[in-house]
Image (cartoon, rainbow, N blue to C red):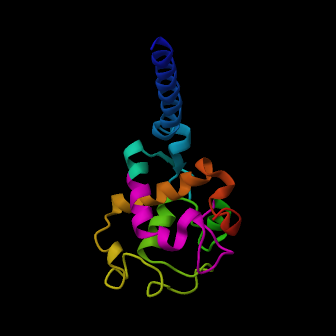
Amino acid sequence: MIKKNTVLALFITTCLVFSSSVFKVYSAELDDSTRTVVFDSSNKTITLTPEQVKRGKRLFNNSCAQCHNGGITKTNPNIGLELESLGLATPARDNIESLIDYMQNPTSYDGQNSIAELHPSIKSAEIFPKMRNLTNEDLLSMAGYILIQPRIAQEKWGGGKIYY
């Protein structure tokens, strides 16, 4: 009887220690430096709140992940949502303000043509209903989520077929 109780107690303790260490990783808040992103083209920064990051993730998964799961672009795997691709776009889309502008009025990668009829946006909300009720605060949260992902997922974000 004592042996069974000891084994059971040891098993329960091991499970609790393991689960608390695993859940600690998932529930830990991101530090300020991870949540700090470039706000505009003058390199002004903004630190997102943990709530903004969570909201951005939820909104991104609901509105964007169908085509951009893991930061890739299913319709053009050569262009992802990693900072390098965002920075090489015209205009550069590597800050909050420019990503919000893109989500409102999307253009081709070279910035020459509107793609609002093809890409979900606020401008085309009648075609893409998921964009219909998004506020500027929602767009800020989604843009922030996109910009912090390279720090969290590293090379997996935008990594394409290698990872997804």
Image x and y of residue 7, in percent: 51, 20
Identify whether 37 is placed above or below 70: above
Q: Most extreme residue toward the left, as rendered?
A: 133
Q: Most extreme residue toward the top, as rendered?
A: 2
Q: Most extreme residue toward the right, as rendered?
A: 162
Count of marks placed on residues: 0
Q: Which residue is located at x 35 percent, y 85 percent?
A: 127
Image x and y of residue 135, in percent: 31, 64
**In what quadrant of the picture does the C terminus appear?**
bottom right
Q: Which residue is located at x 53 percent, y 30 percent?
A: 18
**In what quadrant of the picture does the N terminus appear?**
top left
Residue 63, quarter of picture: bottom left
Q: Is residue 51 visible?
A: yes
Image x and y of residue 133, in percent: 28, 69
Find out whether residue 64 is within the magenta segment: yes
Image x and y of residue 50, in percent: 41, 43
Camera-nearest residue between 7 and 75 = 7
Q: Which residue is located at x 51 percent, y 15 percent?
A: 3
Identify whether 43 is placed above or below 97: above
Q: Point out the stretch of residues depicted in magenta.
A: 55-82
Residue 161, quarter of picture: bottom right
Camera-nearest residue between 75 and 6 = 6
Find out whether residue 56 is within the magenta segment: yes
Identify whether 131 is placed above or below 10: below
Camera-nearest residue between 75 and 101 = 75
